[in-house]
Every structure is written in structure tokens, then in C-alpha cells.
């Protein structure tokens, strides 16, 4: 055989081999590579030079760079950053961003500003736009799942879906007339309709949001408990948030707020308690026994000087506890990264011991803790095969991120929301290189500015 034939034969053989190897690669949607993967799994495994393979809505493989030889798809270079599960904001009222920074630190702002403004101004349109605005802030700061409680919650669901977030969204129920209901019976009915509409949604888990133990009638709480069971729907509620609430429930019912909620049948694995500041040791045991989830909202609690929840004790006892911001009128930002440092340092201070609240505990609360609080730990909260692909990437090139000896310390003590580069939720890119993909951020900001002008006008007309 002439030499050129041999050369040609060898070339074709090599080409075929190469093609065969490419063809053999499994085609997937996304492969994230070149970063430190904080898996937040049971063993808190960290993978250097790690790869996360995503297909459809799920994580299908996690490992080192050799995985890239097996899979092909859209490659996302983490550029030596931190790849971790999306953070969970376990308590907020997203639409209230339209009132952010109004009358901060006025002692009676709830009755003087918030309730009257909500009665006059809150509408489906305002809830939709306010939630859209907040959802942009949340995804850009690495929050992939929220627990929300507000009026016209169906409009909040539309906005959350549009941005591409995951949410446990609960319709507010209170004993007063509100912008979305003449009576609590009407808002309970609104909640049921909302649950029926969204019960099979892939991103939204609809539920009930009774406001607080002292602002909802006992009979309504019993009804909500029965409906929650009937529809297998979650309930989110403010619990033991203030000393006044604790004293009032004690006076009216001879029980702590936690014991009272148990007596009406609400405490179970569908329940998510926000705040839990004024809880006794017996209350903590009861919350644990009833498998209740808790949202610890540190910045909102200390800003309003309400107190510091015994959240560390709850965490150490194995209670399902995550982190929340509360509404943007209370906590101002919707950003969980900002909570991390406060949670770490304030628990150290109140326990007079710097070793009690380690950075990996705090990051665990922000991810798996939140997933456990929502009873969704089998679906989200860590980077593990079979879980929904809610994955974020933080860059480690900015000056505040250098050096990086310990990624947990970097996250808790020096990172901020602007370090979040890329966000994937349910297997889809939602933020890429700090740009929100599904909505026009500038347009939303303009709409919020228009609402701000109407708020100013309303406050002036109220004579404030
Ligand atoms: Zn709240």
C-alpha cells in the first residue's frame, strides 16, 4: 500500500475515534465548571475544581473536572469562584419593597403608616410590580427560593414565576378588613382559590398566611388548620415576635403563643413559624416534636429592637431552622448574604463565646436549614444528584473576596450580594453575569419610582 494511503487511513481512523468519543458524550443542558463546589450535603463535602452537571430541572452529576469528558452542553466557567446551592429566604413580604425606607425607626409606624397605606394603596397591580422588583433583588443576591406572605398573593405568584424563582407563597389572613378582603372569611376563600390554581405548579407551592396569633381569630385559626390538612398546603405565620404578643396570648389563653397554636392544631410539618423570639425551652421542645419549620430573621429583629431569637439553641437541638429577611419595610434588604454576618456575630455576642456560631453553621442555615424549614430538603438546599438544580456562582476576584483561605468564612464575613455572578433555578439560567434574564430591570425600576411618587402623595394626604 502506498504511503499516502496508509497516512489517509490512519487520519480517517483517528478522526473516527475522535468523533466517536464526542458522540459518546452525554448531551445535557448545562455544565458548571472551574469552581469550588460547596455541596452543603450531609458531610459538608467541598470539591475543588468541581463540576456540576444539570439537565432538565435537576442536578444529574457532581464531581471533579473529569466529568467534562463524559458530558457536553452549555459550559459555564465559574472562574475559580464558589459554586453553591441557592440561598433560601424563609420569610418575607416581597411586595412591600414599594414602602422601603419610609418612616424607618418611627415607633408606631405599623399603625401610623403601614396599615393605612396598605388599606389605601395595595392592589393586584402594586403586589405584582412590588414582588417583581423584590424578586430581581433576590435573584441577583443568590436567593433562589422564598417564603412569602402578603395580600393578593396570586399576583405575587405571577411575578415570582416571571422572574423564574421558586416560592412557598402564602395568602395573608387577618381579622381586619384589608385591601383584598372585606373579612377574614373572604381572604380564607381567596387563599383556597389560590391553592387550587397553583397546587400543581412546578415552582410555586401555594399556602395560607395567617398573620399572627393575636391578629387572627381562634375560630379562623382552627379553620385554617383544617383546610391546610385538606389541601396538604403549608401555613406560614409570625409567631412569638414581640413581648406584647406573648403577654396578650398568655393573658387571653393562659398559654404561650407556641402552646396556643398547638392547641388550635396548627403545629405540624406543614407549618413555618417566622421569628420565634419569645419562646421558652418547653416551646422549643414542642416545635421540635411537632416537626415545625422556623425562619430566623436576625436583621429585622434587631433593627426593631424586638430581641434575639434563641435560634442557635434551636439549630443545635436539630430543629428545622433557616434564615429570612422579613419584609423590606422591616429588614430593608431581601438579601440573605447580608444576614450571614449578623447571624454569626450577634449569636456570638449574646452567648459571650466566639466559637458557638461557626461560618459553616450559618451557611448551612441559609441553604439546607431553609430547605428543612420548608420541608423541601429532599428537593433543594444542597448540590446533590437528584435535587432540583438551584445553583449559584459567586466570583472570588473582587478585592473583598481575596484571599480565600476558607470559603465559609469568606461568605459569612466578607462577601456581599454583588459577588453573585450567575444564578440557575430549576435548571434554567435566571441571572448571567449579574444580568437578570427574564425581566427588564430598568423598566421595573421605573414602575417602582412611579409608585413611590403615589406613596408620597398618599402620605401627604393622610396628613403625615
Ligand atoms: Zn413578617
Image (cartoon, rainbow, N blue to C red):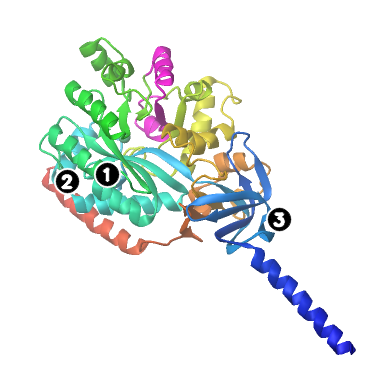
Pointer 1 and pointer 2: residues touching (CB < 8 Å)? Answer: yes
- The picture quadrant where one finds residue 406 is top right
Mark 2 vs mark 3: in front: 3
The residue where tag 1 is placed is 102
Q: Nearer the viewer, mark 1 or mark 3?
A: 3
Mark 3 or mark 2, which is nearer the start of the sequence?
3
Per the model, the C-alpha gap separating discs 2 and 3 is 61 Å
Q: Is residue 106 visible?
A: no
Under tag 3, what secondary structure?
helix
Residue at which label 3 appears: 66
Q: Earlier in the sequence, mark 1 or mark 3?
A: 3
Q: Quadrant of residue 190?
A: top left
Instruction: Classify mark 2 as within 8 Å of ligand 1 or not, answering yes or no.
Output: no
Q: Position of residue 12 (x, y in %)?
A: 76, 80
Which residue is farthest top? 254
Magenta span: 279-307
- Packing grade of label 2 (10 A; few <14, some 14-19, many >=20) is some
Q: Quadrant of residue 409?
A: top right
Query: Could you say which disc has been placed on residue 459 in the image?
Result: 2
Q: Is residue 443 magenta?
A: no
Q: Nearer the viewer, residue 354 or 74?
A: 74
On screen, residue 343 above or below 388: above
Name which residue lies at 32% across and 25% down: 239
Q: Quadrant of the C terminus?
A: top left
Answer whether labels 1 and 3 touch (C-beta < 8 Å): no
**Residue 268 percent coordinates (x, y):** 36, 24
- Residue 416: image location, x then y, percent: 51, 47
Give the secondary structure at mark 2: helix
- The foreground one among 438 and 252 is 438
Amino acid at each position: 500500500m502506498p504511503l499516502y494511503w496508509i497516512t489517509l487511513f490512519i487520519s480517517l481512523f483517528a478522526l473516527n475515534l475522535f468523533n466517536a468519543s464526542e458522540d459518546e458524550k452525554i448531551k445535557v443542558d448545562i455544565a458548571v465548571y472551574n469552581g469550588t463546589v460547596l455541596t452543603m450535603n450531609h458531610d459538608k463535602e467541598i470539591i475543588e475544581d468541581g463540576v456540576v452537571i444539570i439537565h432538565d430541572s435537576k442536578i444529574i452529576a457532581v464531581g471533579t473536572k473529569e466529568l467534562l469528558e463524559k458530558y457536553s452542553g452549555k459550559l459555564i466557567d465559574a472562574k475559580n469562584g464558589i459554586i453553591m446551592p441557592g440561598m433560601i429566604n424563609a420569610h418575607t413580604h416581597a411586595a412591600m419593597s414599594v414602602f422601603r425606607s419610609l418612616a424607618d425607626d418611627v415607633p408606631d409606624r405599623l399603625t401610623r403608616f403601614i396599615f393605612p397605606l396598605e388599606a389605601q394603596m395595595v392592589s393586584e397591580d402594586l403586589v405584582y410590580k412590588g414582588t417583581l422588583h423584590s424578586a430581581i433583588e433576590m435573584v441577583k443576591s443568590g436567593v433562589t427560593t422564598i417564603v412569602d406572605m402578603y395580600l393578593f398573593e396570586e399576583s405575587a405568584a405571577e411575578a415570582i414565576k416571571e422572574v423564574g424563582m421558586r416560592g412557598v407563597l402564602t395568602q395573608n389572613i387577618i381579622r381586619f378588613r384589608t385591601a383584598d378582603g372585606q373579612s377574614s372569611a373572604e381572604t380564607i376563600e381567596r387563599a383556597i382559590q389560590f391553592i387550587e390554581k397553583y397546587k400543581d405548579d412546578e415552582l410555586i407551592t401555594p399556602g395560607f398566611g395567617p398573620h399572627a396569633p393575636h391578629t387572627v381569630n381562634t375560630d379562623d385559626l382552627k379553620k385554617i388548620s383544617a383546610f391546610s390538612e385538606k389541601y396538604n398546603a403549608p401555613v406560614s405565620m409570625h409567631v412569638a415576635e414581640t413581648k406584647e404578643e406573648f403577654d396578650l396570648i398568655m393573658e387571653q389563653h393562659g398559654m404561650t403563643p407556641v402552646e396556643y397554636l398547638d392547641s388550635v392544631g396548627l403545629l405540624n410539618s406543614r407549618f413555618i413559624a417566622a421569628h420565634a423570639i419569645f419562646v421558652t425551652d418547653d416551646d422549643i421542645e414542642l416545635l421540635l416534636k411537632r416537626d415545625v419549620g422556623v425562619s430566623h430573621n436576625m436583621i429585622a429583629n434587631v433593627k426593631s429592637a424586638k430581641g434575639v431569637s434563641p435560634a442557635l439553641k434551636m439549630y443545635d437541638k436539630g430543629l428545622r431552622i433557616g434564615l429570612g429577611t422579613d419584609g423590606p419595610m422591616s429588614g430593608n434588604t431581601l438579601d440573605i448574604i447580608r444576614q450571614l454576618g449578623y447571624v454569626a456575630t450577634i449569636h456570638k455576642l449574646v452567648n459571650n463565646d466566639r466559637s458557638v456560631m461557626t461560618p459553616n453553621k450559618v451557611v448551612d442555615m441559609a441553604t439546607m436549614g431553609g430547605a428543612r424549614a420548608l420541608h423541601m430538603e429532599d428537593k433543594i438546599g444542597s448540590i446533590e444528584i437528584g435535587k432540583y438544580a438551584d445553583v449559584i456562582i459567586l466570583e472570588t476576584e473582587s478585592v473583598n473576596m481575596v484571599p480565600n483561605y476558607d470559603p465559609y468564612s469568606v461568605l459569612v464575613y466578607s462577601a456581599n450580594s454583588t459577588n453573585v455572578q450567575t444564578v440557575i433555578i430549576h435548571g434554567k439560567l435566571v441571572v448571567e453575569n449579574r444580568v437578570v434574564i427574564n425581566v427588564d430591570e430598568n423598566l421595573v425600576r421605573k414602575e417602582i419610582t412611579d409608585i413611590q411618587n403615589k406613596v408620597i402623595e398618599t402620605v401627604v394626604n393622610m396628613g403625615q
